[in-house]
Image (cartoon, rainbow, N blue to C red):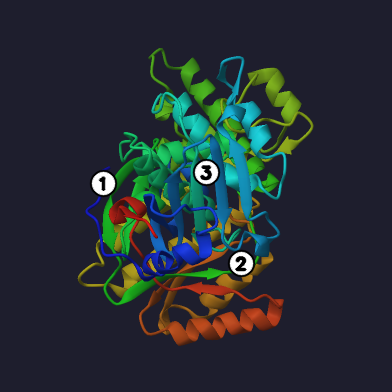
Amino acid sequence: MREQEPQPAPPDLKHFLSRIKRDFGGILAPQREITIARAPARLDIMGGIADYSGSIVVESTLQEATLVAVQKRTDQRILIKSQGAEKEGLKNLVEFYLADLYQDNGLKPLETLRALFNRDPKSAWAAYILGFFPLLIEEGICEAFSVGANIAVESTVPLGAGVASSAALEVAGLLALQHAFDLEIQAERLPLLCQKVENHLVGAPCGVMDQMTCALGEKGKLLSIRCQPAEIIGTTSWPRGYQFVGINSGVKHSVGGSRYTDTRTAAFMGRKIILGAAEDANTGDELPFGGYLCNINPDLWQTKLKKKVPARMRGQEFLKIYTSHDDPVTRIDPEKTYTIRRCTEHPILENARVEEFLRLIQLQSDSPNEEQLIRAGELMYESHASYSKNCSLGAPETDLLVNLIQEQGATSGLYGAKITGGGSGGTVAVLMADGQEGLLRNIVSLYADSTGLQPDLFFHSSPGALHLGVTQTQFE
C-alpha cells in the first residue's frame, strides 16, 4: 500500500471549511491550528463478509463521506462534537479526560476501556475516535498524550446503511489525529489500527475491507484487496459505459448484531475443524491453507472437507471437543446451536466467485463484452443468494430490491445486484449501464410503494482519505 498523491478538495470539504466557525466555534478555539481529514463511505461490490476468512474483496468508494477536525488542547480534556447526532437519538457532545485511561500508573486494559466508552449507549459512538487514544499508546505509536483535543465530526454517510459509516469515522479520525499530533503511522498500518479500534474498543467483530477502502480507495475505481490480512491487489477502472450504484434499503444493519456475529463465529468453528483435521495429516510447522478458509479450493471442499464439518453443532459440544475457535473478537455461546457447515462454505465459494468476477471486470475497461458483463452480474446474484441460504444474513427488503432488478435484466441495462457488507438489511450494490438511472429510480419507487420505506441512491464516487490527504486551517 502507498499513500496517494493529494487531490482537489471535494465540495463537502469546501462546504465544511466555510462553516467550521459557525457550526463548531463552540468547541474549536480561534487562532489555533485545526487539522481536517475526510473519508468516504464504501460500496461493497463483491466479497463482503468473506473478508474475515481471508477472501479477495472488490470495493468502491462513494461520494458520501465523514469529515473530522482535530485541534490540540492545552489541558487533558477531550471534547467530541458530532453535527446532527441528536437526529439519531444520540448525544452530540461527548467529554472525556485522558486521566481516565489510566489506573495504578498504567494504561487500563482495553476491555475495561471498552466498557467505559460504551456505558452510555447515547454516547458510545465516540468510542470510534476515543479508542485511538489508548490504542496508539498500547501499540507503541505514542508514549502518552500530554494534552487532549477538540474534535468536530460531520457526516453525510447514513448510519446502519451498510456502507461503512463506522470505518469512515475511524479513518478520518485517525488520519486527523495522526497529523494533529505529528505521529508516525505508515499508510498500510492505518486501516489495521482502525479495525483494532472497532474490534477491541467498540466491540464490533468487523473485517478490514471497510477501513482499507475508506483509506485507500480511488474515485471511480474498484479496489481489490486480499484480506490476509490486508494486501492491496490493485485498482480497476469501472467498465467504460457502466457504473456501480448503491441502493440503501432503509433497513438498518449492524456488524455488532447477533446474526453477523453468529455467522462469523460459525465460520471460525468450521475453520478450526478443518485446520485441525489437516494438521493431523501434516507434519509441517505452517498452518494448512495459510490459516485462511478462502485458500481452500472449492473442489477440495466439495469432495473431501465438507463432510468433515457438521451441519450444526451446539456451542458447548464444540468447546468440549476443540476448546476454542481461535477468533480473538467473538466468543462461542455454549447454549447456542451454530450452522457451521453453511457458514464455512460461504467464504470458500465466495472467494472463487470474487476471483472470477474480478477477471471479468478487468477485461472490460476498454471494450466491454456483453456476455462477460452478464456473467459478472450472475456472480453478484449468486453471492446475494449465499448471504441468505448459507449465512442467514438476508432481508426481505433487500431481496425485493434484488428481485426487482433481476426482473428487468441485462436487456434493460441492469446486470447484477447483491446485498452488501454485513447484510441483514443495509445497501444493495448494482452493476448497470450508464443512462439507466431513470429505470433504477422507477424500481426504487416501486420498492417504496411496496414497503413504505424511503431508500437512498448512491450514484457517485470520491477519493479515499489517504488519496485526499489532510487540510489544515484556523479561524479568527
Q: Label 2's element? A: helix
Q: Residue at x 44, y 36 (%)?
A: 193
Which residue position holds label 1?
A: 3
Q: Quadrant of residue 245?
A: bottom left
Residue 129's label in the rendered image is 3
In the displayed structure image, the side of residue 247 where residue 299 appears, left or right: left
Which residue position holds label 2?
A: 398
Which one is nearer the viewer's eye here, 224 or 288?
224
Residue 419 seen by the camera: no
Q: Quadrant of the C terminus?
A: bottom left
Residue 407 seen by the camera: yes
Q: Residue at x 57, y 53 (%)?
A: 81
Amino acid identity at mark 1? Glu
Which one is nearer the viewer's eye here, 138 or 192?
138
Question: How far from the left and from the top, in percent, is residue 231?
Answer: 33, 40
Amino acid identity at mark 3? Ile
